[in-house]
Amino acid sequence: MKVMILLASMLLAASTITVGQAKGTTHEWAGVWEITDPSKPGGMVTLADDSGSLQGTITFNVKDRDTGKRIAIEVRSLVNPHIEGDAVVFQVRGILKPHLQGETDTDTAADTELAKMKLEPAGAGKASMVCANCGNTAPIAMAKEQ
């Protein structure tokens, strides 16, 4: 009986260690993640875990479509950033603008609408950012600043 209890305890400990390694931590994600995708205007996600929970901002470079020159920088606070599995999930307020994608009715997207974002690991010091409700958008390649 003692052997069975010992074996069960060892299996439980091993499964806890395995599960713990598969999940990301706030410390692993803390830092500056830059957009490296050359087809995107650029920007970054800055994450901090100063209070034991994630906080941060996302910065978008806005470029003129005709000239390619940067014409603005938009900074937004992350809403409810948290770890889900090995990814960071958060929302961003005020970036869903269908009128910038060729739609004519600017009233369809209020500035308070939340974009649902996910930052997933893609190798050492690399990540991929996706927006679940931004339409047909490809994942954006990112790299952590050293």
Image (cartoon, rainbow, N blue to C red):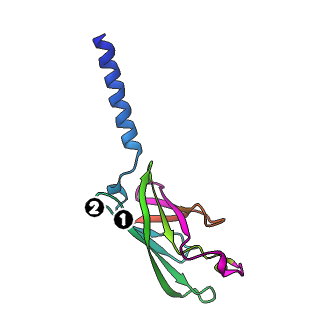
SS for dot 1:
strand
Tell me the amino acid under the disc marked 2. Ser
Q: Are marks 2 and 1 in contact (CB under 8 Å)?
A: yes
Q: Which residue is mark 2?
A: 51
Q: Residues within 10 Å of mark 2 (few under 14, many from 20)?
A: few
Residue linked to disc 1: 55
On-image quarter of the N terminus: top left
Secondary structure at badge 2 equals: loop
68, 45: nearer the viewer: 45
Residue 40, quarter of picture: bottom right
84 horizontally vs 17: left or right: right
Q: Kindly identify the residue that appears in the image at 36 percent across and 41 percent down.
A: 20
CA gap, disc 2 and disc 1: 9 Å
Which residue is painted at 33% across and 58% down in the image? 53
Tell me the quarter of the picture where residue 82 sits.
bottom left
Residue 73, how many percent across, how many down?
47, 83
Q: Looking at the picture, which amino acid does disc 1 mark? A: Gln
Vertical position of residue 74 compared to residue 44: above or below: below
The image shows residue 111 at horizontal and vertical percentages of 55, 77
The residue lying toward the viewer, choosing from 112 and 41, is: 112
Coordinates of residue 43 in the picture (x, y in percent)? 47, 75
Task: Look at 56% across and 70% down and name the residue there.
Answer: 113
Q: How many neighbours does mark 1 have within 10 angstroms: few (below 14), some (14-19), or many (20 or more)?
A: many
Which range of residues does the magenta coloring cover?
102-128
